[in-house]
Image (cartoon, helix red, strand yellow):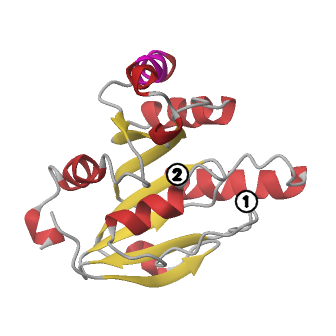
Amino acid sequence: MDIKSAEFARGITGTNKILEDNKSQIAFIGRSNVGKSSIINLLANRKNLVKSSSKPGKTRQINFFLINKKVYFVDLPGYGFMKMDLKRKEKIRKLIIWYLFRSEVEIDKVVFIVDAKTGPTDFDIEMLDLLKKSERKVIIVANKIDKLKKNDIRKQISKIEEITGYSKIIPFSVKKKKGKNELLDRIFNNIEKSKIF
């Protein structure tokens, strides 16, 4: 699957007509500074489609990007930024949970991004448990493997698999463009061709 066009569609903080659009929605979720924006940009072959801030935790809305005029990549706000006050943290948490579990949106898949070096956070585990219970299709990406020694990558991936209970985790590096094709294949696999071409 090659991405030929990608454009920003809309940012929302609650109910919006875009949620009723019949296009497939692929949600991207991960803690602040895990490289979510860079991954979406790499997949879309665009350097600045998703603006990444120098201040983690700045994005406070759900951003929709129209891919190939057929599919939405949905960028959820990053969570867990330590310097963010508790009120704002809770607001972001509620927004994420509303979209994933209470908005009744037909989400095809959830791309869940964790840091390959530090592994899943407590909130990552909590969110993954909720996704399992709601039977969402989840793809876990272990980003920033370029920060690990080559011999440690497999060990870390195995550790993340053990902690999360998910197998087939994708080792990923934006810097080295590793994992891009595998992630695109997993995202678009089993989605009706009429929805993506």
Q: Position of residue 155 (x, y in %)?
A: 43, 17
Q: What stretch is highlighted in magenta?
A: 155-162
Q: Earlier in the sequence, mark 2 or mark 1?
A: 2
Q: Residue at x 83, y 46 (%)?
A: 82
Q: Where is residue 30 in the image (x, y as percent from the top left)?
A: 56, 48
Q: In which quarter of the image is residue 70?
A: bottom left
In this view, the residue in front, 82 or 20, is 82
Q: Is residue 104 visible?
A: no
The amino acid on which the numbered mark 2 sits, given as a three-letter code, is Ile
Q: Position of residue 4 (x, y in %)?
A: 21, 79
Q: Which dot, 2 or 1, sits closer to the camera?
A: 1
In this view, the residue in front, 99 or 4, is 4
Q: What element carries label 1?
A: loop
Answer left or right for 184 relative to 37: left
Q: What element carries label 2?
A: strand
In this view, the residue in front, 173 or 195, is 173
Q: Can residue 53 be seen in this view?
A: yes
Name the image quarter holding the C terminus.
bottom left
Residue 195 sits above or below residue 48 on the image: above
Q: For label 2, count other residues whose C-alpha is less than 10 Å away and answer few (under 14), some (14-19) or many (20+).
A: many
Name the image quarter holding the N terminus.
bottom left
In magenta stretch: residue 158: yes
Q: Where is residue 105 in the image (x, y as percent from the top left)?
A: 42, 61
User: Label 1: which residue?
Assistant: 56
Q: Which residue is drawn at 88% across and 50% down?
A: 86
User: Label 2: which residue?
Assistant: 29
Q: Residue at x 83, y 58 (%)?
A: 88
Q: Residue 79 carries which label?
A: none
